[in-house]
Amino acid sequence: MKKLFPFLRSMRFGMILLVLVMLCSLAGSLVPQGEQAMTYVRAYGASAANVLIAVGITDIFHTWYFYLLEVLLCGNLVLCSLVRFPAARRLFPALKEHTKSAEPEIPFEPGQTEQAEAFLRRNHFRRDGNLWFKGAAGAYGSFGVHLSILVILVFGSLVLMTPRIQDETVMPEQTLTLEDGTAITCLSFHIEDETGKLDYASRLRVTSPDGKSVAEQEIRVNEPLRFGGYKVYQQTYGTAGRVHIRNSANNAEETLYLTEPCFLSIDGKNGIFFRALYPGYLEEEDGSYTLITSTSMGYPDPVYDVQSVTDGSAASVLAFPEETIQIGDVFFTFLLPAEYPGLRIKHVSPVLYGGLYFGFGLMVVALYLCFFLAPVCVRVEEEGFVLCSPKARDGLLISLQAALQDERPTGGQS
Amino acid sequence: MNVLLFAAIILYFAASVLQFAAVAAKKAPLHRVARILLLAGFAVHTAFTVWRGIAAGRLPLANQFEFASGFAWAAALLGFLLYLRLRQEGILTAAMPAAFLILSYAAFQPREIRELMPALRSTWFALHIGSAAFSYAAFAIAGGLGVSYLLRLRKGKEESDPQLKQLDYVGYRMVCLGFLLLTVVIFSGAIWAEQAWSSWWSWDPKETWALITWIFYAIYLHQRLRLRWQGRRMAVLAIVALVLVLFTFAGVNLLLPGLHSYASQ
């Protein structure tokens, strides 16, 4: 136990964990993730595929050992941070004391004291007698970086592992009601904007469960709608057939969207069975039609593949927009298809998001402190100077010596 | 306007050749001419980039050609700024061929100007891709300095040589800058992905390789700052890391399609 604890908080252990995470990531990027077993059999052969699946490389980022690596890395960072914080607090005062008591290590030539002081002033050092210093905050840089990784790992894992996501398609002018009563109405959807540029935008209206709060916004990729604890994303889009149904017996009318095969009937026996919507067709010389299945060009000549069902017998029919099929008293008029959005509705936890953003910000600031504001103390004496810094010594020494030679660095070399 | 692109490539090439000749012959006037050529190449490259930005009506960093061009531009700019500060010819010896090689790679990519796809129309676009270009440029210069360091060692210089120590230190500082910027790239990408696709992290190949690169540089920095590694070992690590950067930049687009596949178009 005496040896285990120092090892668990050691940099060596941290490095081992990072290398293992790196190797897992490498494997995860080279082997397709989360595919069907047959995909791996085709790609690598049966025996290799069996090994890959058994070891979990086919879904490596969700394996127990990858989670274990994350937990161990968190543990290493916690222990490391616990050790680093007191050390970071002590660093700057200790550096000052050490600089005060050390013997000048680099001698000055006559007149160089003023040059050195001018250099230190130019580089924003603060002065206390013959002691010059800067970068007190930088002492916390390394601690901050490690703490930020911990924060990001913890909050990032919680965000990724506890998603409350709902994917829904909402037809234009239809309303989707969520579990808590929040209502999302799709007012319109378009693929291209008025200039013809691809846009994929939905205009939504969201109403709170009590109806008191209403938000209306056009959403598109990069511009989700925020409302209460929800974020609504423009995720996908699709094309649906439309049919207008009129019952001449009672003059009832309704327009329905057709997205999947269904039987449209009033009495349950006679009606229209919708099979599919095709984007176009080719008319052959003999008058028959070849249906086009590719939707890459949109729906230039839409055609409905339906069956009319009357008294138990069915007949296949191709219906074109504006065409009406009558079954008994009911008139089915097929309309031009409509585009509709696929929405992703995500429940957002402000605490988790806040934690993650805090971790991101902390790491950038802490890295800056670590690299560009490292603590430095310099004592300038008549006979020479002392320069103490755990991280910035080499660089400052190069710059200072160059400044002493020529007021500015001139170390040109070939 | 392609003439500007090819003029920049030729000027970077001429600058690199003269710089190497100056190193071999130890002639300061050649260095001066090489610097002038680098500046001329940079000016022409800047003019080309500005023209392309105006023609496209956006920041010209949206596909593999534009990003590679931005990467080369950033390498030339960083190299020159760093040279102005430290007056170290070794920096330009690394930056000039880096700019030339990356811009030459760009010239082989499809160059037509395309409309920005909806997923890229974001306020995060400039920060995410701009910081990636500068991050890669810093790593490229660090890798170039690593090569330069090892070549000088082979020529018989000692690790204690002050010039080699400077090369070693500048390479390390370039890694610090690149690492900070790569962190910004990853975080801005995560925030952007959440805005666009609702997920911070998808283990997409580009994301994963950015993480692999980040971890490798984190190991580099720990070895440097904690274990006091310097010199030859750091140079080797910087070169290996540069290979990872280049794979993340170009190899992933070619070999590992994913959410960032538009970058290869």
Image (tube, coloured by chain):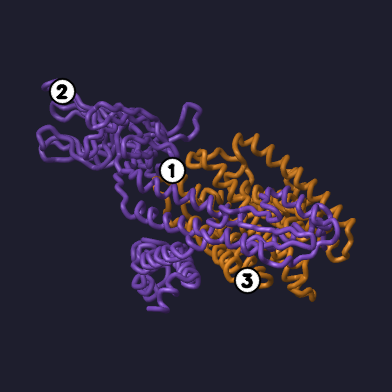
In the rendered image, which residue does mark 1 sit on? Answer: B196
Identify the element where label 3 is drawn. loop
Image spot of residue B211 (x, y percent): 50, 59
Instruction: Give the answer, above or below, for where A156 lies relative to A321.
Output: below
Query: How many other residues sit within 10 Å of disc 1, few (<14), some (14-19) or many (≥20)?
Result: many
Q: Which chain is purple?
A: A
Instruction: Please state the chain letter of the residue tagged with numbered disc 1 in the rendered image.
Output: B
Q: Amino acid at mark 2?
A: Ala
Q: Which chain is orange?
A: B
Q: Residue at x 88, y 58 (%)?
A: B28
Q: CA distance from mark 2 to mark 1?
A: 43 Å
Can residue B27 be seen here? The reply is: yes
Which label number is shown at residue B229? 3
Residue B47 lies left or right of residue A304; in this view the side is: right
Q: Quadrant of residue A37?
A: bottom left
Image spot of residue B112 (x, y percent): 62, 42
Tags 2 and 3 on a common chain: no
Front disc: 2 or 3: 3
Quadrant (top left/top right/bottom left/bottom right) for the C terminus of chain A: bottom right
Q: Residue at x 13, y 26 (%)?
A: A329
Which label number is shown at residue A252? 2
Front disc: 2 or 1: 1
Image spot of residue A331 (x, y percent): 19, 26
Instruction: Give the answer, above or below, for where A194 lies relative to B127.
Output: above
Q: Residue at x 37, y 42 (%)?
A: A236
Tags 2 and 1 on a common chain: no
Can residue A39 be seen here? The reply is: no
**Of pointers 1 and 3, the one earlier in the residue sequence:** 1
Q: Are marks 2 and 3 in contact (CB under 8 Å)?
A: no
Quadrant (top left/top right/bottom left/bottom right) for the N terminus of chain A: bottom left
